[in-house]
Image (tube, rainbow, N blue to C red):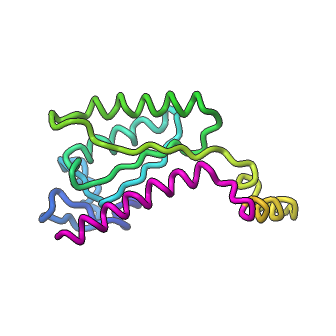
Amino acid sequence: MDCAAEVFSFRRNDTDTLSTTPKTTAALKHTKKLRVSDIIVGLFREESQAKPGLHFLFEKTAGNKKSQYLVIVNAITSDLQRTKKFEADMNFLAESFDTGEGLHPFDFASVHENPVLRNLGGDSDIADRSFIELIVQKQFRSYSHLFGILEEKLETFRKNMDQI
């Protein structure tokens, strides 16, 4: 069984909920829309292995434009040019799944490679001290941008819920 089927409740629409049985994975192939959450964060690298997942995400969320917030994250990127190309690719992909109602709105963020975080968890006291220094100096710029987007989406979601 697909791991995602164990964690999430997949819905065909707002009233018809699929159960999380082995049939869930097969049923997902036949759903027009996928509603996992009101805010979906997709973490992807700019590699060819990510393309099927990106296509699946845009395809299955295309019909939920007004009720879902989509955040695409270029995960662990190494340079600005690759990030810009990945963002352009995401805009092109969003255009290809336009159902005539306009593009699926999404926010884009990137998380840059951080050698301190990469070395964390090893046997080195230097890595632990570097991590503490990183936190004290608040050097998480790309993470701050991503979490700023998420805070904004959560606030919008809360306001929308209060109006119901």
Please, what is the dominant secondary structure of the magenta stretch? helix
x 26%, y 46%: residue: 60
Q: Residue furthest right?
A: 125
In the rendered image, which quarter contains the N terminus? bottom left
Say if 93 sits above or below 108 in the image.
Answer: above
- Relative side of 116 to 63, left or right: right
Say if 124 sits above or below 89 in the image.
Answer: below
Say if 39 sits above or below 91 in the image.
Answer: below
x 27%, y 54%: residue: 68
The answer to whether residue 134 is magenta is: no
The answer to whether residue 160 is magenta is: yes
Q: Quadrant of residue 138?
A: bottom right
- Relative side of 105 to 145, left or right: left
x 32%, y 60%: residue: 156
- Relative side of 86 to 64, left or right: right
Location of residue 13 in the rendering, given as x and y in whole percent from the top left corner: 15, 58
Magenta stretch bounds: 135-164
Location of residue 42 in the rendering, given as x and y in whole percent from the top left corner: 43, 49
Location of residue 8 in the rendering, given as x and y in whole percent from the top left corner: 33, 65
Location of residue 2 in the rendering, given as x and y in whole percent from the top left corner: 37, 58
Q: Residue furthest left?
A: 15
